[in-house]
Amino acid sequence: MLTIKNISLRRGERKILKEVNLFLGQYEKVGLVGVNGAGKSTLLKIIVGLEEPDLGEINFNGTLSYLSQEVHKEISERNLSKIDGSQYSVSIGEYLIVERGIQVEEWEINKLLNNLNMKDKNSNSVLKELSGGQKIKVELIRILLEKSDLLILDEPTNFLDIPSAQWLMGYLVNYPNAVIVVSHDLRLMNKGISKIWFLNENESKVEVFKGNYEKFLKQIALRDELLLKSLKNQERRAKKIYESAKILAGRGSTKEKVKAAKKFELAEKEKEKAKQIQKKLVKSKKMKISIPTPLNCSRNVLTVEGISKEYIKGIPVLKDISFDVEKRERFAIIGKNGAGKTTLLKILAGKLKPTKGKYAWGAGTSVGYYSQEYEDLKYSNTVLEDIYGLDWGDMDRRAFLGRFLISGEMVHQKVKTLSGGEKTRLALAKLFAGRHNVLLLDEPTTYLDPDSQKILLESLKEYKGTVILVSHEPEFVRKLGIDKVLLMPEEKYSYFKEEYIGLVGIT
């Protein structure tokens, strides 16, 4: 059904893919895995036809549906007059059936909305009134309803709450056709995966492992264990030959010196074999985040009084929200998709104006905002062009970016060509370089692999400023050490209780 032949791709001096050969059968479920920035999204774009490889070809027979990793940006940039109508507001059903031409009954749409935890919406709900996360769910519904021969989903669970993610992965397990999925939550569809494509960033090649994700992890661990044993044996062999050569070289006869020379040559070859094994054991580089110490500010960091927000008159997104935040507190905003969490952060960041109410930042506060839509990244710039406008003080720009695994030729890439994980790391680098004493973080773990999430968490725990966080990751919220919460849409402001963790990513 899908054949990939000798695909190779470079970006400057950076090798992304090298002679990749893959085959996908008609009903196979494939998990594509690899570290952030390895090239997973790039490979998917080549398969879909959105990018051209330097060498190689793709052969595909059938219909295909593709969910981009950056579907949130595509939705915000799409011509809204086409989606929402220039004279009237299009409903979810009209968008799917009329605009997208999908042959489906309204009850089927309602069933999928319910499965994706949008129980308060139906096919007659107006698309324009949905939050960004809810619109992504509608796009996901569109793709599922197309019932293509091949589904290609790049991080489909990133903007989903936990029940929705669990339902989606279960749906993919039982999908009657082929699936390629990139996700940090592959365990959720573990039983359904028939094959793993592992993009090895050190070799720029894709290795194929039969079986599910759990089996793949065991195979990788066993392979590393055997490689380590082989390396030790090889090093011992090289050392033994070298020591033997030294003894021969110390003797007087010409014959023995000739033998010694040959042994030295053999010892070097054995050392080279050891180096090749060592390369295979090299682990991916990890971020080394160090958030600069922020400037001092007043004890009272933020006061919010009676904030309300309406995008459409008479339909409130936020209703009479009040709370306060003190210096160095960890404050979490918890609520389901569409509750207005992102809207509230945008207001506090000065990106939106409230319809009613007011807020005030304390004396000496410097507020940094991380947006899940990467609002502060300029896609048409290179990485270096994008960061040169910042006040870096005495910090070395390149060295600081390097701590976020942005180095070498990558600094000359256009921001738009970066993967989701690379954009996240760039956005975090820009944020932390600002030396802000207040951080507004809207889903900062999205697109980060589990190791990178842990590194970010530890950095935030050490951070000497104030954190106001939106996250759908329960463990991230728990381990950060939250002091206060705002529960939405109840607008309940409270000191943190352990029971609130159960609401993260679920409500």
Image (cartoon, rainbow, N blue to C red):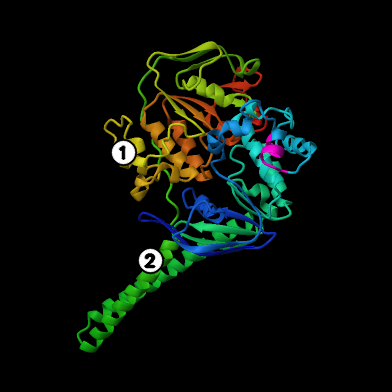
Q: In this orientation, which residue lies closer to the viewer: 498 or 203?
A: 203
Q: Position of residue 391 (x, y in %)?
A: 31, 29
- Can you name the residue that lies furthest to the front here? 87
Circle 1 sits in a helix, a strand or a loop, which is it? Answer: helix
Q: Residues within 10 Å of mark 1 (few under 14, many from 20)?
A: some
Q: In this orientation, which residue lies closer to the viewer: 495 or 399?
A: 399
Residue 291 appears in view? no
Find out whether residue 96 is within the magenta segment: yes
Q: Mark 1 vs mark 2: which is more N-terminal?
A: 2
Q: Position of residue 427 (x, y in %)?
A: 43, 36
Q: Position of residue 343 (x, y in %)?
A: 56, 23
The majority secondary structure of the magenta stretch comes to helix
Mark 1 sits on what residue? 397
Numbered range of the magenta stretch: 95-102
| Tag nearer the camera, 1 or 2 | 1
Residue type marked 1: Arg
Residue for point 65% across, 21% down: 489
Check if mark 1's residue and mark 2's residue have beta carbons within 8 Å: no
User: Any mark on residue 275, and which?
Assistant: 2
Query: Between marks 1 and 2, how big is the CA–CA gap?
Result: 33 Å
Q: In this orientation, which residue lies closer to the viewer: 453 or 447?
A: 447
Quarter of the image for the N terminus: give it. bottom right
Quarter of the image for the C terminus: give it. top right
Circle 2 sits in a helix, a strand or a loop, which is it? Answer: helix
User: Any mark on residue 350, and which?
Assistant: none
Residue 282 appears in view? yes
Whether 368 is drawn above or below 22: the answer is above
Residue type marked 2: Lys
Find out whether residue 104 is within the magenta segment: no
Whether 286 is drawn above or below 239: the answer is above
